[in-house]
């Protein structure tokens, strides 16, 4: 594809954007906007607030804050995999291999990046994995 043939569709998603609330509902997780953080912290009144190192927010000033405990805990949780995580990793790897093979078989000169990405997403969804990392 020549540079002159590129359009914004080759680089940017122009489709509908899912709202934060509908994304949270689909992923079955609780999401709060940062504008709600003060009210939530006030409601739950945590005895200790774990934050990542770096710039602090005035929202956490009234609370007992540790910026040193969370990072090591995250590192350990990422390093040690339970059998269920290993199964998920294997399933994701298998689906990704299949999706890449489908793209290699069906992509043709002149296809846009968006078309190829859609084919990749479709193949993942066909394997029961609708979300990409």
Image (cartoon, rainbow, N blue to C red):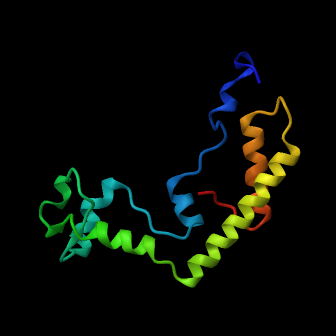
Residue beneath the point at 52% across and 63% down: 24
Q: Quadrant of residue 111?
A: top right
Residue beneath the point at 22% across and 69% down: 49
Instruction: Specify the farthest residue to the bottom.
Output: 83
- Is residue 28 or residue 68 the one in the foreground? 68
Instruction: Specify the farthest residue to the top.
Output: 4
Left or right, residue 84 beside residue 98: left
- Is residue 117 or residue 78 the one in the foreground? 78
Residue 61 position, x and y percent, is 13, 60
Q: Quadrant of residue 125?
A: bottom right
Residue beneath the point at 56% across and 59% down: 23
- Quarter of the image for the C terminus: give it: bottom right
Residue 52 position, x and y percent, is 27, 60
In this rendering, the answer to whether 119 lies above or below 72 is above
Left or right, residue 121 beside residue 27: right
Residue 64 position, x and y percent, is 13, 70
Residue 100 position, x and y percent, is 76, 52
- Is residue 122 or residue 22 the one in the foreground? 122
């Amino acid at each position: 594809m020549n540079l002159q043939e590129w359009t914004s569709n080759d680089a940017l998603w122009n489709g509908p954007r899912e709202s934060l609330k509908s994304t949270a509902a689909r992923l079955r997780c609780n999401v709060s906007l940062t504008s709600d953080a003060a009210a939530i912290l006030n409601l739950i009144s945590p005895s200790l607030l774990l934050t990542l190192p770096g710039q602090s927010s005035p929202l956490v000033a009234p609370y007992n804050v540790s910026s040193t405990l969370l990072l090591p805990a995250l590192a350990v949780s990422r390093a040690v995999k339970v059998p269920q995580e290993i199964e998920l990793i294997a399933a994701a790897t298998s689906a990704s291999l299949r999706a890449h093979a489908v793209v290699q078989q069906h992509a043709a000169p002149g296809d846009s990046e968006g078309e190829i990405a859609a084919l990749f997403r479709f193949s993942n969804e066909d394997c029961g994995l609708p979300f990409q990392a």
